[in-house]
Image (cartoon, grey):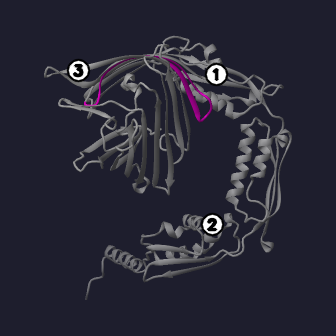
Amino acid sequence: MRPAPHPFATAIAIALSFLAAGAARAAVVQRVDIVGLDEAMTQNVRLSLSLVEAIGQDVSGRRMSYLVREAEDETREALAPFGYYSPTIEVKRDRDDQVVTITVDPGEPVRVRGFKVAIDGEAADDDYMRAELDAFLPKPGAPFDSTLYDAGKTRITRRLAERGYFDAALAEHRVEVTRADHAADIDLRWTSGARFDMGHVTFVEEPAQPIDPRLLDKLVYWEEGSYYHQGKLDRLRTALADLDYFSGIDIEAKPAEAGADKRVPVTVTLTPAKRSIYTYGLSYGTESGPGARLGLERRYLNSRGHKALAQVDWAQKRKTLTLQYRIPAFAWIDGWYNASLQFADEQTDYIDTRRAELVASRSGQVNRNLTANASLHVLRERWAYALAANGGAPVVDYRYASFVFPALSAQYVDVDDRMFPRRGGSLNLELRGGLQGAGSDANFSQTHATANWFLGLGPTDRLLLRGEIGHTFTNALVDMPPSLRFYAGGARSIRGYGEREVSPRVVTDHGFFSIGAKNVIAASAEYERYFGGGPWGAAAFVDSGNAFNGSLADWRSGVGVGVRWRSPVGPVRIDVARGLDHPDSKFQVYLSIGAQL
């Protein structure tokens, strides 16, 4: 007689049989296809399907059947926001290919029939709010898209608050959908109440008060009691940030504390930034050689907000000392009074010069896109125009020049993102000139313009176009020092050539010198692609142009490729390029960090 099985062994056998049965009934879906819808609706349906979340997973047959049944209802709900309430939906599952196909005929959409969108109260006469009402979507006759409806409702509510209608409220917000008629009736109405005004602005500096509040009061450009607008506070925030005195800026409007006069008090809480900024680093340039940079900037020297900067760039063949003093300015436009003194010494293959330059300027931001700078320059420069022979021994033939001249420059920038623009452009224009007998050794005037244009191509690609043109009006170019002449070549000019390599040159047995030119023309076209939309990308480019006096015969062009990295501190560009004017041209390597504007 066989012994009875142990109870524990029996339990294990039963459990294994259940597991085997479950495994036999397990189901897998590898792909879900949605057919018959546009891209937006397809994406919304896909995000709504529980079946999509199970792709690639082993689930029980019962669970899979449930997910397939639910796909129809989930698809129907996902189409409702687009105005399609009566779609025809067919769900098929191919067990062999492990594919589920959802075929959808969205049918006739529900369209807007009744359209009542209005504002009662003072805002009814506000031109900006009327424009918002006129722009409200969806319009009568259009499919009722609840996404557009909710966005329009939110935008008007936000705009009422931005424009000072703090008592505004939704009095009516109703949408009635009649499926039999495929119609939707919108009834939206706000009551705005009275518009509030700007109240007193109080500045609080914590934990210390390094800046006199009377200085900050000058940034408040509006009159107390003028109409309230959030844009005024946004402009104040920008002005405070541009001063660079504070690490934290918190602006709080307090409509709840407004009195019977409806004036909104504003409290600006400021956290002072670290007073001193120390900079240091190493550098290397193919022309300048190895070097080091040291700098000290005082964000504020006193309670009046004066600033000071001292910086030394010391390289093997190029040395610069810069001293700068800045005072905040508020007359006409917010900006700075600047005084700077720079000493420079360059002994490279392309230039032999020493100069001292004193500059006094007034800069400021005219509007959101335009900044301007007016300056007066006092320049003293010594340079080697050529190498001459004197009894067989090379002698450096130095020239000297002194110039006093005014200059006016402006920069216009209109892009979607200043750090990494994908749409828009910029224009820089500079005018300067001096008179012989009024501090200058020669009569001259100059105009110089550079432009950039950016165009995003799809989610990952970008086209960059750049142009430069400059001209000098003078009959005494030989008396013009190198710093007042035009050059081409380098990372921001014609890649494939060294910095300032492209210009008329003097060649001797002891080297050659680029002496600069009266004119410059350069252009560049660059195509960038970023992999997977991530921070790394590649570029291909062609640059062309020349710095010349009377003839364009020596037109230069260069081509190359590069690596791009959108780092947390700004774009990093590494380019390799080669000039096309000579078969033995060497490859040039360029490293650039920072925005291209």
Residue appearing at x 24%, y 46% in the figure: 585
Q: Give the number of the disc on residue 78.
A: 2
Q: Give the number of the disc on residue 396.
A: 3
With 131 as the anchor, is 65 left or right in this view? left
Q: Secondary structure at mark 2?
A: helix
Q: Secondary structure at mark 3?
A: strand
**In the depicted structure, whether residue 119 falls above or below residue 266:** below
Amino acid at circle 1: Leu
Mark-to-mark CA distance, 1 and 2: 50 Å
Mark-to-mark CA distance, 3 and 2: 81 Å
Q: Give the number of the disc on residue 219.
A: 1
Could you say which quadrant of the image residue 507 lies in?
A: top left
Q: Secondary structure at mark 1?
A: loop
Local crowd size for mark 2, using a 10 Å CA cut-off: few (<14), some (14–19), many (≥20):
many
Dominant SS of magenta comes to: strand
- Residue extending farthest to the bottom is 1
**In the depicted structure, whether residue 508 falls above or below residue 115:** above
Q: The N terminus is located in which quarter? A: bottom left
Report the label total: 3
Instruction: Identify which residue, 431 or 122, lies in the foreground.
Output: 431
Can residue 416 be seen here? The reply is yes
